[in-house]
Image (cartoon, grey):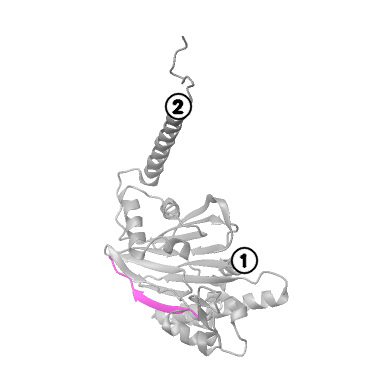
Amino acid sequence: MGTLLDKPVTEKETETETGSNGLEFGASAMQGWRVDMEDSHTIVANVAGLEGHSFVAVFDGHGGALCAAYAGENMMRHVMETAEFAEYAESTEKDTTVLEKALYAAFLACDRSVKASQDANPEGDRSGSTAVASFVTPTHVVLAHAGDSRAVLASGQKVAVATADHKPYNDGERARIEKAGGVVSMKRVDGDLAVSRALGDFQYKDDALPPEECKVSPAPETRSFPRSPQDEFLVVACDGIWDVMSDEDCTQAVREIFVEGESSMGLACEEILDMGSRDNMSAVLVAFPGLKRSETGKGVAGRRAQRAAEDSESNADSLSQGETSEEAADQAAGEPTGDSKET
């Protein structure tokens, strides 16, 4: 994970948006215990030229911040520049498998652009980044991911869909790594990189091989599935979230936040980040019309007030115990305590 700070940076960058399609969006990012912030994210609540479509993505950088930052700023542009996106936009049928192909092509195009930038500056940042992206259309949810950033859909009070992390020790990933001349050691590519698919990381990529065949591939796994009236929310987040929570734990935590009366998507994301990791943390939350909310309760503000009260009580107890220990030590030494009276 790299060098850690003595104490975490807990300030958060948070945003909320609402789409014309009735979807609500929240995002929050926190540096945490890491020396640098290497995550980025994207929210496009209303995709230009596609009525009722939204796009979100999270990029988790490693070895530097530039790859993730570039992807966060440019992935949507790369998608819109693909022939597949133009085909989808012009079609009346809106076949989401075409949108999957647009995402696939965009990941590869983004990777090529990052390489061109790094080649132009050999002494600069050589970072990589995992990526997870989603289009929400009027009828479907479309996912693409490379690495261990994850998307999880909660629907009907359960986890309906979750992406599977790309890890070097997975059978299919291991086979590709070894075929490309690499090894999987200590569950890492060549004993070093903990993910088997990522943007950047060109020391693990061979120009003589197709992107899909490199030790570390930028090629995303894509899928699409129909929306349901029971859909509650989509969580798109980096591994800093999933390192401390299972898919089920995370979705239940989000549910409880809204049941307790929270109305802000951004504050809901902040609360998820506060559940604890030593890594950078970024999360995007997409709320569907099927999300159940309570109009009563204090939401995240109530939780924070309760934590503050508990911390204050704990500090008071610690102070009291410390004073008691000092008095006991004084008595053992034959010295008068603060309650003793001089004669």
Q: CA distance from mark 2 to mark 1?
A: 56 Å
Tell whether position 228 is magenta: yes
Instruction: Identify the residue under disc 1.
Output: 64
Tell whether position 160 is magenta: no
Q: Residue furthest top?
A: 343
The earlier-in-sequence mark between 2 and 1 is 1
- Image check: 43 left or right of 123? left
Query: Which span is picked out in magenta?
Result: 219-230
Residue 302 position, x and y percent, is: 37, 42
The disc placed on residue 166 is none
Residue 140 position, x and y percent, is: 36, 73
Within 10 Å of disc 1 (Cα), the crowding (few <14, some 14-19, many 20+) is some
Residue 227 sits in which quadrant? bottom left
- Image check: 321 left or right of 69? left
Residue at 46 percent of width and 60 percent of height: 283
Residue 317 position, x and y percent, is: 40, 34
Residue 13 visible at all = yes
Instruction: Give the mark toward the camera: 2 or 1.
Output: 2
The disc placed on residue 332 is 2
As displayed, is residue 249 above or below residue 6? below
* Residue contact between numbered discs 2 and 1, judged by CB atoms under 8 Å: no
Residue at 29 percent of width and 49 percent of height: 294
| Amino acid at pointer 1 | Gly
Within 10 Å of disc 2 (Cα), the crowding (few <14, some 14-19, many 20+) is few
Viewer-proximal residue, 156 or 306?
306
| Amino acid at pointer 2 | Ala
Q: Secondary structure at mark 2?
A: helix
